[in-house]
Amino acid sequence: MKKLSLIAAAALAVTTSAVLAATNPATSTFQVLITVNKACSVVAGTASNIDFGAVDSSATNLSASSNISVTCSKTTPYNIGLQPSLATSTTGAGVMSSVTTSDTVAYQLRSGSATGPVWGSTATATDVGNGVAGTGTGVAQTIPVHATVASANVTPGAYADTVTVLVNY
């Protein structure tokens, strides 16, 4: 019986030693997580104004251009639309008005060049429509905007319109 007790004690000692001899240090893991949402921003403002300057009322076939700045997350596709405020059209055809006369000066927004495709407001997040497409790089991208005026044959004075830039992503 003494022998049996000694064997049991030895077995218990070996088992206890195995449990007590676990990995030192004890380890486990966890994750550090983040979800980055796609995002875009656009900068236009006075630095982006398209200014035809002072022209004679006999001037025709005028063109001028400027730039807007679009910043989108890396690899984020986007489509830019332009909507003149005084026009009901989605084709980028606008009219500049004056505070001193009822005359207006019609203009057309274009991409690429003064003779490039019309640039309107039908772009959506999934379809470029009559807008301009791009892919974000995570830094500001300069996008040129062109405008044309067929004729300045209106009452002399200052004319203006505001264009809304729509970045769909």
Image: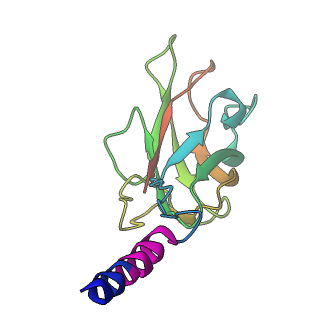
x and y, in percent, of residue 65 in the image: 70, 47
Residue ID at (54%, 51%): 109
Residue ID at (64%, 52%): 146
In the rendered view, tell whether residue 116 sits above or below residue 52: below
x and y, in percent, of residue 106 in the image: 50, 40
How many numbered marks, from 0 up?
0
Secondary structure character of the magenta stretch overall: helix
x and y, in percent, of residue 10 in the image: 40, 82
Residue 147, visible in the rendered structure: no
x and y, in percent, of residue 71 in the image: 61, 49
Q: Quadrant of the N terminus?
A: bottom left
Q: Residue furthest front?
A: 2
Residue ID at (39%, 59%): 123
Q: Residue furthest top?
A: 100
Q: Front-most of 24 and 89?
A: 24
In the rendered view, tell whether residue 66 sits above or below residue 131: above
Q: Front-most of 81 and 126?
A: 126
Q: Front-most of 28 and 55?
A: 28
Q: Front-most of 117 and 68?
A: 68
Residue 30, visible in the rendered structure: yes
Q: Quadrant of the C terminus?
A: bottom left
Q: Where on the picture, by quarter, is residue 153?
A: top right
Residue ID at (61%, 49%): 70
In the rendered view, tell whether residue 92 sits above or below residue 31: above
Magenta residue span: 10-22
Give the left or right position of residue 68, taking residue 106 as reference.
right
Residue 169 magenta: no
